Amino acid sequence: MITQIYSLKTVDEALACIEVGATNIGVNPTAKNSGKTFDEALAESKAIFDAVGDKATKVALTIDDTEEERTKIIETLHPDILHISGAEDDATPELVAELKAKYPGMKIMQAVPMTGPEAIDKAIAFSKFCDLLILDSVLTGVIGTGAAGVTHDWAWDKAIVDGASCPVIIAGGLGPDNVADAIKAVRPYGVDSLTKTNKNGTNLGEKDIEKVRLFCERAHATAKELGI
């Protein structure tokens, strides 16, 4: 079971999350809603990825960035997975082919906003040319898809997992309290947490490493119990 933790702000946080069971470390170098400049956010993310090395899978988020910004993110961070999110920046077959030709080995993960049953067909369409999907909640006032801190109907996620052509990570208000139930309901490839493993329970703040440990332990134990 993939256990993906977002959004890491420091090297110490990232390494501590890996120590307690995180398999994927996600960073947000786009500077959206962070109070940082693009270059400051990128430098912070690079320090984290340099320290992580091959200890975990490195995931970099891009939210409606320009082509120049996206290229700088990729060529500075060399992520294992590029996480595409935003209102105006969906992946296309042409973009994925172009990125894969230019950056061999980098996987593309498309964020799907889980706004209702209409998300099912959209996700399945993305799954035909993306390497991974991440299904996440949306909230008015939060840029992009995710960082909402609320759940959505897991029946939509289950329909996508059953019909998708690529692995699916589920997100949206997941934490130690509900990750086992989510896995039992959906049987995904992986689970993702941001707000509910932060100390203050918002999308901005320090990680609560004990919450991360419980999240990862319960996810891995549930997956083992289910044989997935």
Image (spheres, rainbow, N blue to C red):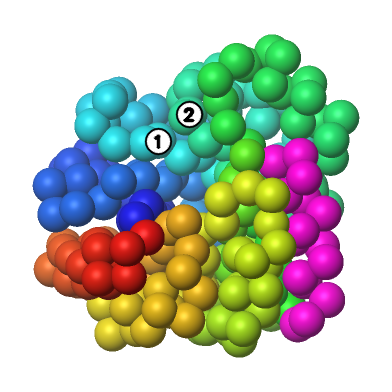
Query: Which picture quadrant has residue 70?
Result: top right
| Other residues around mark 1 within 10 Å, as few (<14) / some (14–19) / many (≥20) | many
Residue 78, x across and y down, in percent: 48, 22
Tag 1 near tag 2, CB within 8 Å: yes
Q: Secondary structure at mark 2?
A: loop
Task: Give the left or right position of residue 31, taking residue 196 as reference.
Answer: right
- Along the viewing direction, whichever of 120 and 198 lies nearer the viewer: 120
Which is more N-terminal, label 2 or label 1?
1
Q: Residue at x 60, y 74 (%)?
A: 158
Q: Is residue 128 magenta?
A: yes
Residue 173, x across and y down, in percent: 45, 78
Q: Secondary structure at mark 1?
A: strand
Q: Is residue 161 above or below residue 50?
A: below
Q: Residue at x 21, y 67 (%)?
A: 221
Whether residue 16 is visible here, answered yes or no, is: no
- Along the viewing direction, whichever of 50 and 177 lies nearer the viewer: 177
Tell me the residue that label 2 is attached to.
79
Q: Amino acid at mark 1?
A: Lys
Q: Amino acid at mark 2?
A: Pro
Residue 214, x across and y down, in percent: 17, 71
Task: Give the left or right position of residue 208, taking residue 169 as reference.
Answer: left
Query: Which picture quadrant has residue 217?
Result: bottom left
**Residue span colored magenta:** 116-130
Numbered circles on residues, count: 2
Tell me the residue that label 1 is attached to.
58
Q: Is residue 21 above or below residue 193?
A: above
Q: Where, quadrant-wise, is the C terminus in this rendering?
A: bottom left
Task: Give the left or right position of residue 107, taking residue 159 as reference.
Answer: left
